[in-house]
Image: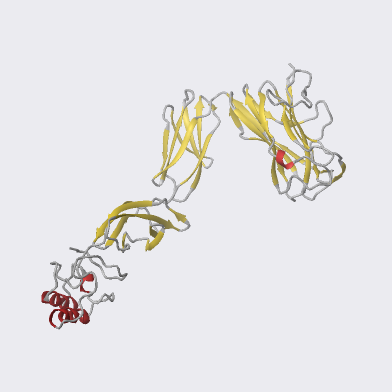
Amino acid sequence: MSQERWCALCLCMLVWIGASANAADPPAIRIVPADDMVAVGEIFAVDLLLENPEGLAIGGFQCFFQFERASVEAVGGEAPLAAAFPPGEGGAGFVAIGPWPGSGFPLYPQWSDGMGVEAVAALGFALPGTSSPVTGTQALLGRFRFRALAPAAAIAFQVGDLLYPVKTTLAGADGRTLETRVETQAVRIVTVARPADLACTADGTGALLTWTEPQGYDGIVVKRDGAVLAQIAAGVSTFRDEGTIVGGTYAYEVVGMVGLQRSPSARCTLSIPLPSPADVSCAIMGDRIRISWVARDTYDAVTVARGGQVIAIAAGDTLSVVDAPPPTVDPVSIEYVLVARKGERTSQPAFCQTRFASPRFIRGDTEGNGGVNIADAIRLLGHLFTAPVLGCVDSGDVDDNGALDLGDAIGILNYLFASGRPPAAPFPDPGIDLTSDTLTCAEGL
């Protein structure tokens, strides 16, 4: 029985093609299907790739390959180099593809071995002597789209000369033919449909795969990085991979099985991120805020930022930091952002928010009772020499120099009994400390 074949033409017409030129490592035209296996009914791409190891200037290309009409049909294509072949003096440079329904491309509409036709073509040319439209070591010369019609063990988009002596080759920008290697790959067409809607998501330190079955399978095979990871029963549409490590990147495949027949692989790639700090909380402690968290991995460091500014880089085993936000009379919303780091990997940010207003106190009122008297001086001396804790340390900084010392206690006594200078603001009414220092006020009025 005769076999009907259809042909694809990729033709770059130069104004002049002269003598050939050879290279130590000649360039290649590769005819590469997007997948090595497709299911009946699927539309798949076939790329024409340029491999150009020496980076030769390419001014044109022509490629003629054949395929079996009973197994596939051409449904579309793209000309990614159209912009690289602009019109030039004395002629038009162009890239076009077709024909198929709606392509509107009239040149060479039929290529056939006499058994029926529907040709596809990609054309382009550049004027010799102009700058090369294609440079670099790799380029996509064209892309065709085909629909799989019937099962086939191997559809090879083979180079051939059916009707015309068309040589698959490249030409330099000067018009000379270049020595060209040609490489082709085959695609297999099967009847078992590919698993649909595959999604891969990070689930803690593992990977969660979900999919749907477009037809009834007898079983499912899950692969990771090309190796079989699990064989599971039909009807199951999820799988959790516990064998991943933080920061690893994994390529997954899910294959449906019907008897001994397999489907094309549904594929996804997933990177497992470093887990973010958990249970992040912001606790107000007077004029300070404590940010605490739970580590979900062994971190090298945790960066804490407020308002886009880093306020701390904590060691990996640290679980909290204390921040002194800018003083404010009216409550404001403050958000902290935490990012963990382990080696070169970083986590997604974790957040906490709180409403904050600076505590109010009276300078010199170390007792925290709303007034200043001799008991405050005694309490301050006790803090300095016998270490009783002040509820608001900042209240003892009578001269507001950022430190507590004997001079502050003397300042209270001078004010009370020698008409000395009154304490610095806030005094005599409650207020907030607008001076930046390290003194705290955990208990305000």
What percent of the width, then of the height, locates residue 238?
42, 34
Residue, x 40% and y 56% (percent of image)? Answer: 340
Residue sitting nearer the eye, 106 or 24: 106
Relative to 72, residue 131 above or below: below
- Viewer-proximal residue among 217 and 75: 75
Q: In which quarter of the image is the N terminus?
A: top right
Residue 322 in the image: state x and y as whole percent. Answer: 30, 63
Q: Is residue 217 visible?
A: yes
Q: Is 386 situated left or right of 66 in this image? A: left
Kindly give the residue lying farthest to the front in the view shown. Answer: 419
Q: Which residue lies furthest to the bottom in this view?
A: 418
Please name the residue shown 31% across and 71% down the image: 437
Judging depth in this view, the residue of 123 and 65 nearest the camera is: 123
Is residue 281 visible from the viewing direction of this image? Answer: no
Residue positioned 13% across, 67% down in the render = 369
Q: Quadrant of the rendered structure where residue 11 is? A: top right
Tell me if residue 256 comes above or below residue 280 in the rendering: above
Image location (x, y in percent) of residue 71: 66, 23
Q: Is residue 200 shown left or right of residue 179?
A: left
Residue at the farthest right position: 19
Quadrant of res 101 = top right
Residue 161: quarter of image: top right
Residue at 69%, 45% in the rendered image: 138
**Rendered location of residue 384, percent (x, y):** 19, 78
Looking at the rendered image, the quarter that the C terminus falls into is bottom left
Left or right side of 248 for 15:
right
Q: Residue furthest top?
A: 1
